[in-house]
Image: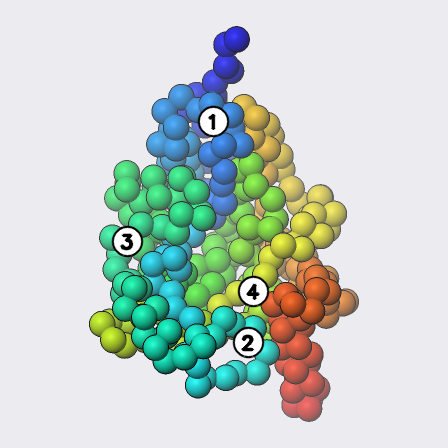
Amino acid sequence: MKTESTTELEIAAGLRALGLNESSAVIVHSSLRSFGHVVGGALAVCRALMATCGTVLVPASTWDLTGVPAPPSLVRPHNAVRTAGSWEEFDAALARAVPFSPDLPTDRGLGRIPETLRQSFDHERSSHSLLSYVAVGRRAAELTAAQRPVWPLGPIEAMAVRGGDVLLLGVDHTVNTAIHVAEQRLGRSRFYRYAKAVDDIWMELPNIPGESHCFNEIEPDLAAETQEVLIGRCRARRIAVSAVVAAAERLIERDPGALLCTDPACRCGAALQQHLAWLATSRVGR
């Protein structure tokens, strides 16, 4: 039985059918498997993206290599973090971790496309120890420069200002990091997390996003803003970053628990408590 294949040219044609062109800037969340068989694999997808778009941004997290649990003596309210049971356990985790460097591979959970983009194209990479980004193209430097250690979602905000788009390739909104921008602007899902800085030294990093497993609830609110095509077997969707952020902000302002689950064991509960505390502070200040 012959397997249907998708080619680089077909992927590029599909991206153009979404309205993307050389002036476009996109943040890409992707699944290579969603296309079915791709001639040339992940590299063909990356080549199609670069042939179509002026700037491509992808998450390039290194959490699996650089991250460590919270040290046992450090407690922050509503932080919902895994804490080492002892200093011996923490020191062992710190010894296993590595400091961030620009040549580290992307987290394996992000899939093959971000790592292939990093390996195969001249790129800029931001230097956040847990949540770096890789960018290729004309606006790569300005997007990665928008990230700061205290504000890791800066590149997505910069995309919104520049009229950029979220591009979902075979994935859903549970990986749409632009929604986290809205959360954090409203005092929600702003967690502290921990990484190795250099040998024997760790660092605390603020404003790390929380859970996203309920983010598909935003889909009806973005229906009118979404362009969609099928590329091979891949459901490809384009939505303006600014539209995603605005829709998420409206949902959260109407319902503080929007896009969160109610499982008491989940970080969603801590995110909600952060937001309620932020609302109380905001009201006092008025």
Report how far apart the C-alphas of labels 3 and 2 lie in the structure: 27 Å
Within-10-Å neighbours for mark 4: few <14, some 14–19, many 20+: many
Q: Looking at numbered disc 2 in the image, what kind of residue is underneath it?
A: Asn
Q: Looking at numbered disc 1 in the image, what kind of residue is underneath it?
A: Ile
Query: Where is mark 1, residue-wise?
Result: 11
Query: Where is mark 3, residue-wise?
Result: 104
First in sequence: mark 3 or mark 1? 1
Q: Looking at numbered disc 3 in the image, what kind of residue is underneath it?
A: Leu
Report how far apart the C-alphas of labels 3 and 4 lie in the structure: 23 Å
Residue at the image position 53 percent from the left and 47 percent from the top: 165
Q: Looking at numbered disc 4 in the image, what kind of residue is underneath it?
A: Gly
Within-10-Å neighbours for mark 2: few <14, some 14–19, many 20+: some
Residue 25 visible in image = no
Query: Where is mark 2, residue-wise?
Result: 79
First in sequence: mark 1 or mark 4? 1
Left or right of 95 on screen, residue 143: right
Query: Where is mark 4, residue-wise?
Result: 210
Within-10-Å neighbours for mark 3: few <14, some 14–19, many 20+: some
